[in-house]
Image (cartoon, rainbow, N blue to C red):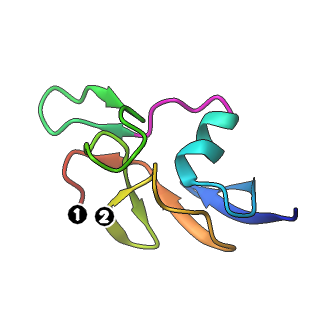
């Protein structure tokens, strides 16, 4: 299986093809990539099946994408998200 390049906040990374963004980040020890809109509390993956909203990221400029069910694609620009995203 080949791997694909992507970036997290501008930092180059690689992930296995067909891997979710959450899995790729956790594999690198990144357990939090979003903060809550109140109190700026860290969030990452919770349910892992797309039901909750803890794993939200901004993907290629689109906020509020669920990292746990979204697969990495070559060239993806993944950004940590603050609150509800903008």
Give the left or right position of residue 75, taking residue 57 as reference. Answer: right
- Residue lying at 35% horizontally and 40% vertically, measured from the top left: 34
- Residue lying at 66% horizontally and 74% vertically, measured from the top left: 75
Residue assigned mark 1: 86
What is the span of residues highlighted in magenta in the rendered image?
28-33
- For the N terminus, give its image quadrant: bottom right
Q: Is residue 81 magenta?
A: no
Please tell me whether residue 70 is drawn above or below residue 27 in the rendered image: below
Report the front residue among 83 and 65.
65
Residue 54's spot in the image, x, y percent? 30, 39
Quadrant of the image occupied by residue 39: top left
Residues marked 1 and 2 touching at CB (< 8 Å): yes
Distance between the alpha carbons at the discs numbered 1 and 2: 6 Å
- Residue lying at 34% horizontally and 32% vertically, measured from the top left: 43
Give the left or right position of residue 35, taking residue 48 as reference. Answer: left
Q: Main secondary structure of the magenta part?
A: loop
Q: Secondary structure at mark 1?
A: loop
Give the left or right position of residue 54, taking residue 77 as reference. Answer: left
Residue 63's spot in the image, x, y percent? 30, 64
Q: Residue furthest right?
A: 1
Q: Is residue 30 magenta?
A: yes
């Amino acid at each position: 299986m080949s791997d694909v390049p992507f970036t997290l906040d501008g930092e180059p990374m690689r992930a296995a093809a067909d891997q979710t963004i959450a899995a790729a980040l956790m594999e690198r020890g990144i357990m939090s990539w979003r903060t809550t809109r109140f109190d700026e509390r860290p969030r990452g993956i919770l349910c892992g099946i797309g039901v909750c909203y803890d794993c939200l990221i901004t993907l290629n400029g689109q906020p509020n994408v669920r990292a746990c069910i979204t697969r990495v694609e070559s060239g993806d620009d993944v950004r940590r998200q603050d609150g509800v995203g903008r």
